[in-house]
Image (cartoon, rainbow, N blue to C red):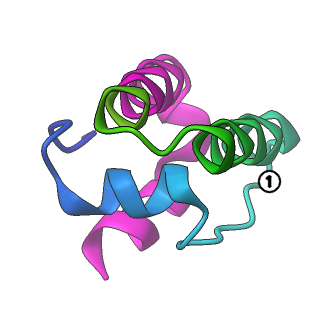
Amino acid sequence: MIPSKSHPRWEALVKGEVKPNFRVFSGNMMLNQLARSINADDSSSNIQHCINQAYDYFSRFETLLIDELKEIFES
């Protein structure tokens, strides 16, 4: 189950403060891209945009990434 977008871990995840190692490499690539976007523009609107992108990605591939997601959001 994917937590809501308001969960504080989403922001830490897209900023690169939480560094999971996904078995599915595209998850790592996507998070690196979002962290670079936030480094270039750390406005609240860009952070929310990045959270939305991450949420959409992980919702789509939840079944493949369930173990990593549990580790991120339950710690």
Q: Is residue 57 magenta?
A: yes
| In front of the other: 47 or 64 | 47
Return the residue at label 1.
Answer: 23
| In front of the other: 46 or 57 | 46
Q: Report the side of 20 relative to 48 (left or right).
A: right
Q: Amino acid at mark 1?
A: Arg
Q: Which residues are magenta?
A: 49-75
Q: Position of residue 5 (x, y in %)?
A: 20, 36
Give the overall secondary structure of the magenta segment. helix
| In front of the other: 34 or 9 | 34
Q: Report the side of 35 relative to 45 (left or right).
A: right
Q: Position of residue 35 (x, y in %)?
A: 65, 49
The residue shown at (66%, 36%) is: 37
Q: Position of residue 63 (x, y in %)?
A: 50, 33
| In front of the other: 68 or 19 | 19
Q: Is 69 drawn above or below residue 63 in the view shown?
A: below
Q: Is 59 drawn above or below residue 33 in the view shown?
A: above
Q: Secondary structure at mark 1?
A: loop
For the N terminus, give its image quadrant: top left
Q: Is 57 drawn above or below residue 21 in the view shown?
A: above
The residue shown at (39%, 34%) is: 51
Residues packed near mark 1 inside 10 Å, few (<14), some (14 to 19) or many (20 plus): few
The residue shown at (79%, 54%) is: 23
The residue shown at (19%, 44%) is: 3
Q: Report the side of 54 relative to 3 (left or right).
A: right
